[in-house]
């Protein structure tokens, strides 16, 4: 499931500053990958994480023309 679905299953509203809904080694891998991502790609990654069904077309319509699968 996407992060949006995982956060929604926690009940209530998720806040952007809340911890990722993943545990253990998966959390550390996610942190490392996000830290290594170029700053210009982070808004695209955030949008993809927040979308219930992220697609390349959705990201492009949202102003991320360089989005790739």
Image (spheres, helix red, strand yellow):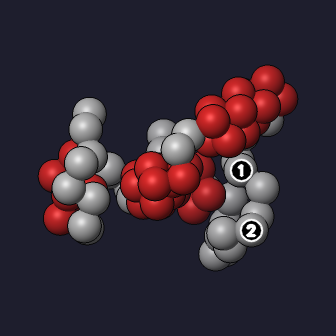
Name which quarter of the figure residue 31 lies in.
top right
Residue at image mark 1: 20
In the picture shown, does residue 55 fall above or below 13? Answer: above
- Residue 50 image position (x, y, % from top left): 47, 60
- Residue 62 image position (x, y, % from top left): 25, 67
Left or right: 23, with 7 as reference point = right
Q: Is residue 5 visible?
A: no
Count every numbered label the image shows and give the total: 2
In the picture shown, does residue 64 fall above or below 37? Answer: below
* Residue occupying image coordinates x 76% and y 64%: 18
Name the residue nearer the viewer: 57 or 41.
41
Left or right: 53, with 22 as reference point = left
Which mark, residue 9? none
* Residue occupying image coordinates x 68% and y 41%: 35
Left or right: 43, with 60 as reference point = right
- Residue 48 image position (x, y, % from top left): 41, 52
Name the residue nearer the viewer: 33 or 23.
33
Q: SS class of the residue under badge 1?
A: loop
Q: Quadrant of the C terminus?
A: top left
Name which quarter of the figure residue 24 lies in.
top right
Q: SS class of the residue under badge 2?
A: loop
* Residue occupying image coordinates x 66% and y 69%: 16
* Residue occupying image coordinates x 48% and y 40%: 1
Which mark, residue 17? 2
User: For mark 1, does the 10 Å Cα neighbourhood hold few (<14), some (14 to 19), or many (20 or more) residues?
Assistant: some
Distance between the alpha carbons at the discs numbered 2 and 1: 9 Å
């Amino acid at each position: 499931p996407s992060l949006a679905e995982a956060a929604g299953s926690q009940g209530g509203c998720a806040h952007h500053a809340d911890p990722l809904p993943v545990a253990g080694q998966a959390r550390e891998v996610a942190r490392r990958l996000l830290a290594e991502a170029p700053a210009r790609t982070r808004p695209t990654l955030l949008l993809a994480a927040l979308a219930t069904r992220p697609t390349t077309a959705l990201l492009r319509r949202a102003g991320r023309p360089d989005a790739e699968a």
